[in-house]
Amino acid sequence: DVNELRDYRGGDPAKWKKYMEQRYKDPSIVDKALEHDVAWRELRAKIDELRKDVNKLQKEVIAPKKKAKEPCDEEVAQMKAMQKEIKDREEELPVMAEKRDAFLNQIGNMVDPEVPISKDEDADNLVVGVYPEPEELKANPNLLPCPLGKLTYTLPETQPLTHDDLLWRIGGYEPVRGQNVGGHRAYFLTNAGVMLNQAIINYGIAFLSARGYNVLQPPFMMNKDVMAGIAQLEDFDEQLYKVSGKTDDPEGSSEKYLIATSEQPICAYHKGDWIDPKELPLRYAGISTCFRKEAGSSGRDIRGIFRVHQFEKIEQFCLTGDDFELSQAEQKRMLDSAKDFYE
């Protein structure tokens, strides 16, 4: 919301510049958004001023002259010129708004005070819980929270099979044949793998339904303009699959995007709706197949069916009131649901 940057509306641009710095992003983007917003507002004010002048000329000069049957060709010509100027300037407004919004869309969300400020999530991501509980944590409950790069604990003597070893032993997937058909990171689920996948999905749906979530299975493709409204296409074009539309569409207006997460279509589920605050929170369980071009960092999670281009996912999506404490409470509720599911 641009009003978050407008100090005369109670906004605080310095706060958002700090958030950008904490994300290791360029804070001057906030200044550029404000510069374009000032230009947009000045143009809007100029148009309003011209309208007032047209109305004044019409009521105080042209109308009395016409009533007195006096010539007013010069004034009418002046009014038409002013009306043309209004029309021309109004055509500039959406162009200026688009430039402003291009910078606004690069500004990230607020940063929770509990989030570690770091460029290395592998080293500094904060671990707040471990399950099953290791002996070190039982002996020292204050061990957590702890940065991931500093956390050490003893693994059990008998370690479980990796997911790909387990799938292979039960005849649950075919990675080689999958890659022969679909290329890098493609796979077939087979027999027990298919049934296990469906069982986990069904369990996830039942689990969230019992906790008051409405289950949504969204469309797997989204119109380009809708996707652009919830994601920065400049950043995501390398990760999102495009589906071409009409062959006679050089501007790509009929292009669609395959979803990378059900969060994207669910985010647009209430597009254009007016929601009564009394109806909040709204809780949804999204179930979808997801598609992503980027299949993970080089050399990381290269085994099995992690970091692949196509996968199923069930996720929690909640809408709350515009209040930080309400949002934090809902976030904790979602976290507790996730912990209960895995434990």
Image (tube, rainbow, N blue to C red):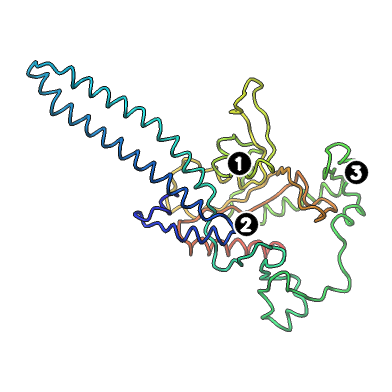
Residue 278 is left or right of residue 208, and the answer is: left
**Circle on res. 210:** 2
Given residues 48 and 156, the one toward you in this image is 48
| Amino acid type indicated by mark 1 | Leu
Q: Is residue 60 left or right of residue 152?
A: left
Q: Position of residue 144 (x, y in %)?
A: 67, 76
Front residue (pair 267, 228):
228
Label 2 CA crowd tier, 10 Å (few <14, some 14–19, many 20+)? few
Q: Residue 176 got which mark?
A: 3
In the rendering, at what x and y percent does residue 38 appear? 38, 46
Q: Which residue is mark 1?
A: 233
* Between discs 3 and 1, the one toward the N terminus: 3
| x, y percent for residue 189 | 84, 45
Instruction: For label 1, count other residues whose C-alpha is less than 10 Å away and answer few (under 14), some (14-19) or many (20+).
Output: some
Q: Taking 160 as reference, is 71 left or right? A: left
* Mark 3 to mark 1 CA distance (whole Å): 33 Å
Q: What secondary structure is found at the residue carrying circle 1?
A: helix
